[in-house]
Structures are given as C-alpha cells and as structure tokens.
Amino acid sequence: MITASQLRAARALLGIDQKTLAELAGLSVPTIQRMEASDGNVRGVVESLTRVVEALDLAGIELIGDNAQSVAGGRGVRLKTSAPRP
C-alpha cells in the first residue's frame, strides 16, 4: 500500500504537480486530490491506485514499505517510526 504522505513526497521529489501526475497515470486531477487527502493508506479504486504506482515507478520513484530495504541507489526520504507527529 502507498500512503497519502508517500504520494505527496513522491510528487515533491519529482517536482511535479497533481495535474502532471494525473496525466502520467491517466487519471483525473480530482482523483489524485482525493488520494492525497486520504488519512494513512490511500483509499480508492485499486485500478486507479495501480496506475499511480506504475506512473511513479516509470518516473523513477521507488516506494519503500514498512521495514523494507531499498534495493536501488539514489536519494530518497523515509519517515522514522519514532518520528514525532506534528
């Protein structure tokens, strides 16, 4: 699963806006907005979520799940489990 925070961070790393991500994934901007507004894991239609994950992968984003290691090099961001919540 991808979280809303991961989705926003992925866009930030790519330097793209919601419109561009929507175009890359073949989805509407409101769909991306709803996904990013989710609490925790992104909610939505599985096909739409799959399209977003595939678009991010093609753009060079590696999504890292809990307790998973990154297999590729490159820069990234990871939230520590003990990070204080604002």
Image: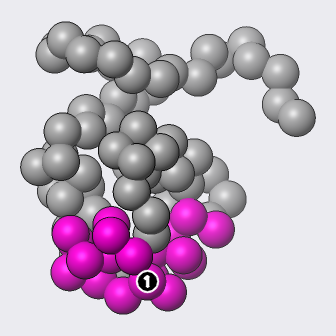
Q: Residue at 41% of width from left, 38% of height from top?
A: 13
Residue 50 appears anywhere in the view: no
The residue under label 1 is which amino acid type? Answer: Val
In magenta stretch: residue 51: no
Q: Provide residue 43's location: percent of width, then percent of height.
A: 50, 69
Q: Provide residue 34's location: percent of width, then percent of height.
A: 55, 77
Seen from the viewer's position, the closer of residues 83 and 14 is 14
In magenta stretch: residue 22: yes
Q: Which residues are magenta?
A: 19-37
Seen from the viewer's position, the closer of residues 2 and 14 is 14
Residue 76, relative to residue 35: is it above or below? above
Seen from the viewer's position, the closer of residues 81 and 75 is 75
Q: Residue at 33% of width from left, 70% of height from top?
A: 20
- The quadrant the C terminus occupies is top right
Mark 1: give few (<14), some (14-19) or many (20+) Cα within 10 Å.
some
Q: Provide residue 8's location: percent of width, then percent of height.
A: 52, 51
Q: Is residue 15 left or right of residue 5?
A: left
